[in-house]
Amino acid sequence: MQSEKTALDRFDRRILEILARDGRISITDLARDVGLSKSPTQARLRRLESAGVIKGYRALLDPIQLGLDHVAFVEVKLSDTREKVLQAFNRAVAAVPEIEQAHMIASHFDYLLKVRTTNMAAYRAVLGEKISALPHVASTSTYVAMEAVKEVGLAEM
């Protein structure tokens, strides 16, 4: 369900652009880079957080350094696409830690999942024991990524 969009001016967009690159920047440095004083910058930051434009702050981990260098994209076709079924599938997907992203797709399949594991054997176990067991899964097709050419969040606006 989509929420109402927050109106953003050039200062808000600049704050978001800077924070997307450096979420640990001090408010003093952020204010300087945005071109506002500290108080209005803090007020804008609180407003963006309260409105849900900024969902949180976190460390970006290198999955390769953590041994999670096997990435597969999985097309999932469901046996039923009524709303109740979609909601059950969505809840179940959220509980599978290896599923890094899940998108409902307008195509000949219903969902596209990004799955990250340590290796092919681990992926096969996730596919067989977790993904195939999700509610109403009729079929899957797997595409293994050979290399991530670009993989970033919203850093440029």
Image (spheres, rainbow, N blue to C red):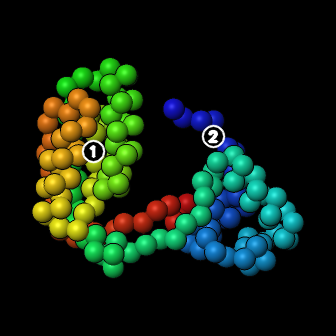
Amino acid on which disc 1 is placed: Leu
Q: For the residue labelled by badge 2, is the local secondary structure a helix, a strand or a loop? A: loop
* Residue 2: x %, y % from top left: 54, 34
Q: Residue at x 51, y 32 (%)?
A: 1
For residue 144, which quarter of the picture? bottom left
Left/right of residue 45 with respect to residue 134 in the rendered view:
right
Q: Residue at x 39, y 37 (%)?
A: 91
Please rate how many residues cluster around mark 1, counting C-alpha atoms within 10 Å: few if below 14, some from 14 to 19, many from 20.
Answer: many
Residue 147 visible to the viewer: yes
For residue 89, which quarter of the picture? top left
Reply above or below: 136 against 16.
above
The disc, 2 or 1, on the residue closer to the chain's N-terminal end is 2
Which residue position holds label 1?
A: 112
Left/right of residue 78 with respect to residue 3 in the rendered view:
left
For residue 132, which quarter of the picture? top left
Amino acid on which disc 2 is placed: Lys
* Residue 31: x %, y % from top left: 77, 72
Left/right of residue 113 with respect to residue 21 in the rendered view:
left
* Residue 52: x %, y % from top left: 64, 48
Which numbered dot is residue 5? 2
Q: Residue at x 72, y 73 (%)?
A: 30
* Residue 94: x %, y % from top left: 39, 45
Reply above or below: 70 against 74.
below
Which numbered dot is residue 29? none
Q: Residue at x 20, y 53 (%)?
A: 126
* Viewer-nearest of discs 2 and 1: 1
Q: Could you tell me how far apart the alpha carbons at marks 2 and 1 are, in whole angstroms?
A: 25 Å
- Nearest the viewer among 73 and 124 is 124
Residue 109 visible to the viewer: no
Q: For the residue labelled by badge 1, is the local secondary structure a helix, a strand or a loop? A: strand
Which quarter of the image is occupied by the C terminus?
bottom right
- Nearest the viewer among 33 and 50 is 50
